[in-house]
Amino acid sequence: MARVLFIEPDRLLGANAKQILKHAGHEVDWHVDPQAAMNSADTAHPQIIVLDLLLAGRSGVEFLYEFRSYPEWAQLPVIIYSNIRPEDFNDSGVGFKHLGIAAYFYKPTTSISELSKAIGQILQLARA
């Protein structure tokens, strides 16, 4: 279905999510380290990014700003999957639209299966 670049620092969650997303038909390039994810994007050719905002060494927002600075990745759909509530993120002065975020999911209330469905829906809309 989709080539997913998945940046998740929690190793247990990342491994489980990778397995569930692969079972749903997605190719998953999962990284704990945001720099490794950035480096692999050229070879993995993702169609969508799933990004946690709480990363080791830098924030997900910093990662996204750098990622968006490359013309070939400027329009790639991004899903935020984080323990930061969406209303807290929006109140921080960084808006969803400014960063080109296609969807935002709060981990405690969103299953990986729901995330998988959203990936398919967002890519379907992007192709239309």
Image: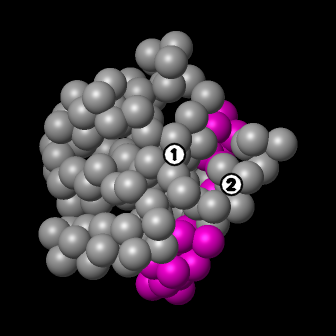
Residue 77 picture quarter: top right
Q: Which part of the image, by quadrant, shows the C terminus?
A: top right
Above/below status of 88 relative to 66: below
Where does the image place residue 98, in percent across and percent down from the top left? 65, 34
Helix, strand or loop at mark 2 = helix
Residue 48 bears which disc, if any?
1
Above/below status of 28 relative to 94: below
Closest to the observer: 20 or 118?
20
Above/below status of 17 relative to 59: below
For the point 73% across and 42% down, which residue is it? 126
Closest to the observer: 1 or 107?
1
Q: Which part of the image, by quadrant, shows the N terminus?
A: bottom right
Residue 59 picture quarter: top left
For the record, the magenta segment spans: 93-117
Residue 55 visible in the picture: no
Query: Are dots 1 and 2 in contact, CB under 8 Å?
Result: yes
Q: Amino acid at mark 1?
A: Ile
Helix, strand or loop at mark 1 = strand
Where does the image place residue 9, in percent across and percent down from the top left? 21, 60
Categorize mark 1 by other alpha carbons within 10 Å: few (<14), some (14-19), many (20+).
many
